[in-house]
Amino acid sequence: MKIMNNEWFTSVVRYGSKDGTKHLYPTVNLDPLVLPKNLKRGVYASWVRVNGITYPGAAYFGPRIIKEESFDVLEIYILDFSAKIYGEKIDFKLEQFIRGVMDFTDFSKLKEQITADVLNIQRVLHVQIKD
């Protein structure tokens, strides 16, 4: 099920706590207020444009329960991408809803789920990532 009518959003990449880089997958942190207020919270297959190049992505919109946060965040793991782009504007669109918000007992369980999400997103977007 496609969503958002192919709408692209723009946000500036913010500095984060670097928990994703340390424990999980490196993500870009974006302003969640660019998204519609009624958007379902969870993981989405997404596309991200950085400097004119489009990459597949795994987007998360919602609270980080594992960190005991109740406010919404917007983070995207950009597949096959590693450049530092803090302070830069990027465009993204949410292609398909993958799953809702989940709680995890520790970062290793969260990483297992993200790995499964990324595999699912690769199938949905018909892409393969490099190792």
Image (spheres, rainbow, N blue to C red):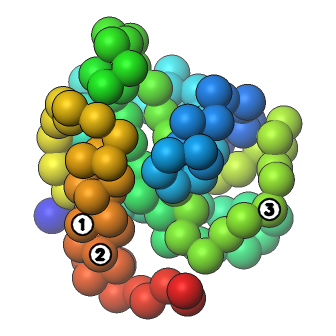
Q: Nearer the viewer, residue 117 or 94?
A: 117
**Where does label 3 land, which residue?**
83
* Image height of 23 relative to 116, above or below: above
Q: Dot 1 lies on which element? A: helix
Q: Residue at x 29, y 75 (%)?
A: 119
Q: Residue at x 21, y 35 (%)?
A: 104
Q: Nearer the viewer, residue 115 or 105?
A: 105
Q: Is residue 126 left or right of residue 48?
A: left
| Crowd rating for badge 1 (residues with CA inside 10 Å; few <14, some 14–19, many 20+) | few
Q: How far apart in space, not on screen, are marks 3 and 1 (Cα)?
A: 24 Å
**Where does label 1 land, which residue?**
116
Q: Nearer the viewer, residue 105 or 55?
A: 105
| Crowd rating for badge 3 (residues with CA inside 10 Å; few <14, some 14–19, many 20+) | few
- State the count of labels: 3
Quadrant (top left/top right/bottom left/bottom right) for the N terminus: bottom left
Mark yes or no: residue 4 visible: no
Quarter holding residue 3: bottom left
What's the amino acid at mark 1?
Ala
**Where does label 2 land, which residue?**
119
Q: Residue at x 67, y 69 (%)?
A: 81
Q: How far apart in space, not on screen, are marks 1 and 2 (Cα)?
A: 5 Å
What's the amino acid at mark 3?
Ala
Q: Residue at x 64, y 36 (%)?
A: 18
From the top left corner, tell me how far across and down residue 88 is, in percent.
Answer: 83, 44
